[in-house]
Amino acid sequence: MTRAVVFAYHNVGFKCLSVLLAHKIEVSLVVTHNDNPAEKIWFDSVAKLAAQHGLPAITPDDPNTTDIVERICALQPDFLFSFYYRNMLKTALLQAPARGALNMHGSLLPKYRGRVPVNWAVIKGETETGATLHYMTEKPDAGDIVEQQAVPILPDDTAADVFGKVTAAAVSVLDRSLPALVAGNAPRVPQDAKLATYFGGRKPADGCIDWKQPAEEVHNLVRGVAPPYPGAFTTIAGRTLRILRTQREPADSPRPRRPQIHVGGDVCYAECADGGTLRILEMELDGKPFAAADFLARFGAKPIDLEAAQQ
């Protein structure tokens, strides 16, 4: 029987571990994370799945310590799999499995190497992304590709929408690839380093809206960090307004203008620097739902200069 050690977290970790079990892979050890109490936990629990199947599971702060490496080597795994595990795995771990260490990455490598690739793909206005199963090297996300599958990003998709598609693609990629991996004839396609792009992690503060940007870029930021992620935000009269969902309004020939926010009828609009207009479909003020009528009652009917409000 094929034996594997699995490093996993989040929905992709949960689903891909399920695929391994469905293929009767012997999972000798699951390495996952303790949930962070400061983080909104909206995803499935790998630890609970391991417990349901009677699999041994550990949650080390650092998986690269000598004792963890020795424990994994003693298991003599054929494969090591990493499915949305958040810590970097160093050379000693990557060399532990007899037949290779593989990672499932949430982009179409070599594009969007690095952290939170789904969020970055939405923020950058991509029209597709995907899931890639690849061999791991010490350089992140740079190893040979086994298989990948693309998914579309629609104009109003949020990162959570796209993450759901990427998770489904990851399941399909792993399910198709496992028989060839076990048989020893899976493809290994080197990545073209010239096409690689790399992006780092993001912090909640990175959701601050720069109103000097065009409407399309503001819209992409809003949907790229929309809940369950921390959300895009701006400041009005010293208060934090989170803008959680927007929609681009059609414009025949927009002209640059000073950005402003105002209410029209029962809708709140943001007029952006390039002349484009965003309909604000969902927002919060100081953490509480805030409708157009609330905006009108709080700030009045006069448009608010967004650049001045942030100064």
Image (cartoon, helix red, strand yellow):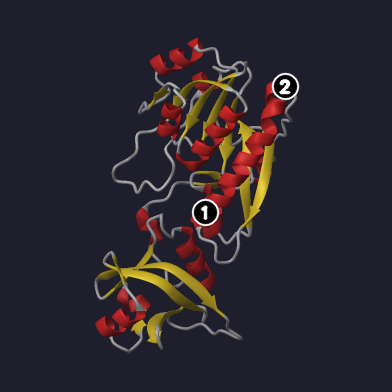
Number of numbered discs overlaid on the protein picture: 2
Measuring from the top left, give residue 288's x and y in whole percent: 28, 67
Q: Are marks 2 and 1 in contact (CB under 8 Å)?
A: no
In the image shown, does 220 or 57 lie closer to the viewer? 57
Measuring from the top left, give residue 212's x and y in whole percent: 45, 73
Measuring from the top left, give residue 179's x and y in whole percent: 70, 27
Q: Residue at x 61, y 35 (%)?
A: 142
Measuring from the top left, give residue 48's x and y in whole percent: 40, 33
Badge 1 density bin: few <14, some 14–19, many ≥20, Cα 10 Å: many
Q: Residue at x 48, y 33 (%)?
A: 8
Badge 2 density bin: few <14, some 14–19, many ≥20, Cα 10 Å: few
Q: Secondary structure at mark 1?
A: helix
Most extreme residue toward the front, as rendered? Answer: 52
Q: Residue at x 51, y 73 (%)?
A: 247
Q: Residue at x 29, y 79 (%)?
A: 294
Q: Secondary structure at mark 2?
A: helix
What label does residue 41 carry, if any?
none
In the image shown, does 290 or 221 lie closer to the viewer? 290
Q: Amino acid at mark 1?
A: Trp
Quickly name the residue at label 2.
Answer: 183
Quickly name the residue at label 1.
Answer: 120
Residue 253 in view here? yes
Residue 112 in view here? no
**Above or below, 84 relative to 58:** below
**Above or below, 125 relative to 84:** below
Q: Amino acid at mark 2?
A: Ala
Q: Distance between the Cα atoms at labels 2 and 1?
A: 35 Å
Quarter of the figure that contains the C terminus: bottom left
The numbered mark, 2 or 1, whose residue comes first in the sequence reads 1
Most extreme residue toward the top, as rendered? Answer: 74
